[in-house]
Amino acid sequence: MDDTIYYKLLGQQIRRARQERKITIEALAEKVGMSTNHIGDIERGNKRPLTHTYNKLCEALNLDAQKVFNQVKLERQKLSSPNKEK
């Protein structure tokens, strides 16, 4: 499986956290010093965030970056493992 799914899953985690905290994309963009378009692209998995960008987003959303990374990794593994039907 290519990395595209990984970045989509990562973006979904960031979007979910932002929405759970009732933070608008505009407020997050202002807080981390990025454009709303860039954050939207990250949330949709269209852009691959650099490490410092990812860390800034996690910090702004009060997320443990390593925990999110591990969660995404597990989700990706689940999607890539074949379904075993009997």
Image (cartoon, grey):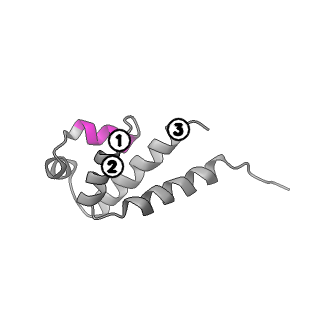
According to the image, label 3 marks what residue? Answer: 3
Between the C-alphas of marks 3 and 1, the distance is: 13 Å
* Residue 60 left/right relative to 65: left
Q: Write the residue at 41% across / 40% down.
A: 45
- The reply to whether discs 1 and 2 touch (Cβ–Cβ < 8 Å) is yes
First of labels 3, 2 by sequence position: 3
Q: Quadrant of the N terminus?
A: top right
**Depth check, front residue: 65 or 7:** 65
Q: Residue at x 21, y 40 (%)?
A: 36
Q: State which quadrant residue 35 falls in.
A: top left
Q: Which of pointers 1 and 2 lies earlier in the amino acid sequence?
A: 1
Q: Where is residue 19 in the image (x, y as percent from the top left)?
A: 30, 58
Find the distance from the CA under tag 1 to the CA under tag 2: 6 Å
**Residue pictured at 43% horizontal, 49% vertical:** 10
Residue behind mark 2: 54
Q: Report the disc number at residue 49.
A: 1
Magenta-highlighted residues: 37-44
Percent of width and height locating residue 58: 31, 57
Q: Position of residue 85 (x, y in %)?
A: 81, 54
